[in-house]
Amino acid sequence: MSFPETRLRRLRYHPRVRELVRTVRLAPKQLIWPLFVREGVGVRQEIRSMPGQFQLSLDELVREGREAVALGLGGVILFGIPAEKDDLGSDSYAQAGIVQRAVRALKDATPDLLVITDVCFCEYTSHGHCGVIHETSHGADVDNDATLELLARQAVSHAEAGADIIAPSGMMDGMISAIRRGLDRAGHMETPILSYAAKYASAFYGPFRDAAESAPQFGDRRTYQMDYAADPAQAIREVEQDLAEGADMVMVKPALAYLDILHRVRTQFPGVPTAAYNVSGEYSMVKAAAAQGWLDERAIAIESLSAMHRAGADIILTYWAKDVARWLGA
Ligand code: PBG
């Protein structure tokens, strides 16, 4: 059939018909809100490059946790900013580390809230890299295998504090099996792992490094995070590897400029819960333009997140989580 029998606009004239035939629907339950925790009391420090997002002390974090529950969000993911950083990032696996205390505070105040923890070292190390540093023939770099043991330790400490899902983001080879083994040995065989499986070295993380105070003090992250110009099949290999090591869910990051990768992962691994991280730079660009009155923040946010969902994300990590939940409910 072709025109005039077929008129594709027929499904678009009536707003109720348009609604009826929609298949891409955003729901607050699929959104995860990233939160930054730091020491102190009553601290609510706005992140300069991310208007509307804050570094929070534990008491303020709990307030946000209550709101996340009230808005029906899928959960939160925590990033810690320790008072003291060192070479090994030892606060990241301390029983009384900032994130461990944050998890306990949330689990006490809002047991219903799903709490995910980011497992990495860059926020905790004095050098800002995602693991232990050693000297190599190409200069100082992260020691992959020495980092694995510490990652497992960090993950176990998060699970002990009560984290519901562990999300390693360091892009070390073998990190999922090291963490899985560590968790299982410590009796946490029921704690799922959401792997940042296809994570690219990206300039879109710029504002996050302000937020988490985690910019690398030398070099960059290109020896561990993926190259955006690499064959996209590399992303499939990363996901395959992490699944083989025991990842329960996988993530593609960043989101908006990587929807092709997201779609490939979705298609290649049906049935594997797939997340997209709508990262700091994606958020800040829109905030900056909206502040100038150049575009409509709400419309852009909902359209972008819908596109991520359409491309294959079941779960979306986004700084807009709270706003979008309100907008969808309004
Ligand atoms: C930690 C981590 C980063 C982000 C999430 N986890 C920073 C990085 O890899 O440099 C970025 C998130 C964002 O930009 O919103 N490794």
Image (tube, rainbow, N blue to C red):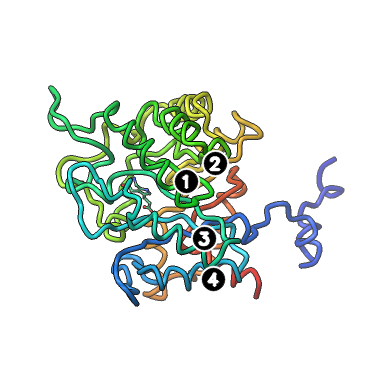
Which residue position is annotated with label 4? 66
Amino acid under disc 1: Ala
Q: Spatial distance from mark 4 to mark 1, Cα to Cα?
A: 21 Å
Residue at 34% of width from left, 31% of height from top? 172
Residue 284 shown left or right of residue 116 in the figure? left
Quadrant (top left, top right, bottom left, bottom right) of the C terminus: bottom right
Which residue lies under the disc numbered 2?
Answer: 191
The residue closer to the viewer here, 303 or 172, is 172
Query: What kind of element bears circle 1?
Result: helix
What residue would you read off at disc 1? 159
Query: Which x, y percent locates residue 127?
Result: 17, 45
List the residue tagged with mark 3: 107
Which numbered disc flags the more N-terminal residue, 3 or 2? 3
Residue at 29% x, 71% y is 40
Could you tell me if the residues under marks 1 and 2 are in contact, i.e. CB atoms within 8 Å?
A: yes
As rendered, which of 175 and 112 lies closer to the eye?
112
Chain-order first, disc 1 or disc 3: 3
Q: CA distance from mark 4 to mark 3?
A: 11 Å
